[in-house]
Structure formats: structure tokens, C-alpha cells
Image (cartoon, rainbow, N blue to C red):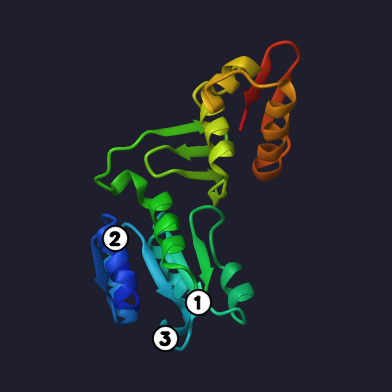
Amino acid sequence: MVPLRQTTSRVLQALRSTGFDTRTLDAVPEVLDAARAHTLAAIVLDVALAGPDPWGFLGELRRIAPQLPIIALTSREQREHTVSLLRCTLDDYLTTPFPVEELVSRLRLRVSDQLSVDRSVLRAGMVTVDTALGLVSVAGRLVTLSPTEYALLVALANRPGEPVSQDRLAEAVWGRPQSSNVVEVYVGYLRRKLGPDRIRTVRGAGYVLDG
């Protein structure tokens, strides 16, 4: 169940069409009561419409439902204050206006265990790859990859902590041998997006995704 503080019909339609069961809660007490009853999977909260004291409301939500993910919709002017109240990788925020697809992706990431979608999730340390949804995250932060970068990451994530040779990577990604320079270039691209220490080079053996 994904409750929405307030949203447009376009957002509601997008969420429902991708497997979310949505509710619109129009008053702060309604949201707090639902949180206490543990009937929610996540909250999408429009900070501007969360009553006269939105930050007090966020603090109360954190107190009564410490594991309930919150995605806060905030203006650029309120962003810094809002972000200071969010809980690391559990919560998230979007600055309005935002693409509906971005909200859907972030919700999927946080309530994936509660969706009735068959999926395969690969994990290596802080790196998570949802191969059914095509989503990649590092420490809860979504990362955008090109198709080639994504294929390379999947090949590495299928053997986390183990070296994968350049030949095996080339076969998995390109379906044919490639020069070592091509593989090295794309590993470099991945390191820049995932973090420089998440992919380790093992001399003579290939690359290891440590995450």
C-alpha cells in the first residue's frame, strides 16, 4: 500500500499501472494513524502540503514508524531543510517539478520486496542490480548506466567477489572477443559512476566487483 499526500491523476495512473496500490491521505492525522497501524509500504509526501509544520510532521513519522520509507516532494527553497530530516538510504526526495518515471523508479527501489513482480536482484556490497526492472543503485542511490555499462555490471554482479576475465566479459557484453582496451575503457566508465574502489583489477585474472 503506497499512500500519497497529494498528487496528480497522471502520477496516480503511473503508480497503479506499475503495480502499486495507492491511497490518497488528505490530513496529517490520517497519515500518522496509518503509519501506526503498519498498513503502509511507503509514503510520498508533498512537503508543501503537510500542514503548518511539515518538519515536525516528518520527525513524528520517523518516531512512530522508523522503518517506513518516505519520499519527500520538496521545492528547491525547502530542499536543504527537508533533506536534513531524511534518514540516509531509507528515505529519498525529489525536487518539484520531477519526471513521473523517476518517482516510480525510486519507489520500486524502496518497496521491491512488497511488489508482486517476479525479479532477480544481484548484490555486491553496496551495489544492487535489479535485472527485472533494470535498476542499479549504490548505497540506495540510483545510478544511470548506458546499455553497455549495464551489461558489463550484470556480468560482474553475477560473480560478486570473484575475478571475471576480460574474455568472459567481452563474450557476455559484446558476444564476441574485444581488445583489452575496450573492456578497460568500459570498466573505467563504470568506476566513475559506481565509485573508483568498487571494481578491483586482479592482475592476470580480470576484474572483481566488490561493491
Identify whether 114 is placed above or below 66.
Answer: above
* Mark carried by residue 40: 2
Tell me if 13 is positioned left or right of 175 in this view: left
Residue closest to the eye, 166 or 9: 166
Task: Name the quadrant containing residue 177.
Answer: top right
Task: Name the quadrant containing residue 30.
Answer: bottom left
Q: Which residue is mark 3?
A: 51
Q: Which residue is mark 1?
A: 97
Q: Quadrant of the C terminus?
A: top right
Q: Amino acid at mark 3?
A: Gly
Tell me if 195 is positioned left or right of 32 in this view: right
| Distance CA(mark 3)–CA(mark 1) | 20 Å
| Distance CA(mark 2)–CA(mark 1) | 25 Å
Q: Amino acid at mark 1?
A: Pro
Give the mark nearer the N terminus: 2 vs 1.
2
Residue 171, image x and y in percent? Answer: 55, 19
Residue 48, image x and y in percent? Answer: 47, 84
Name which residue lies at 41% across and 67% down. 100
* Mark carried by residue 119: none
Label 3 element class: loop
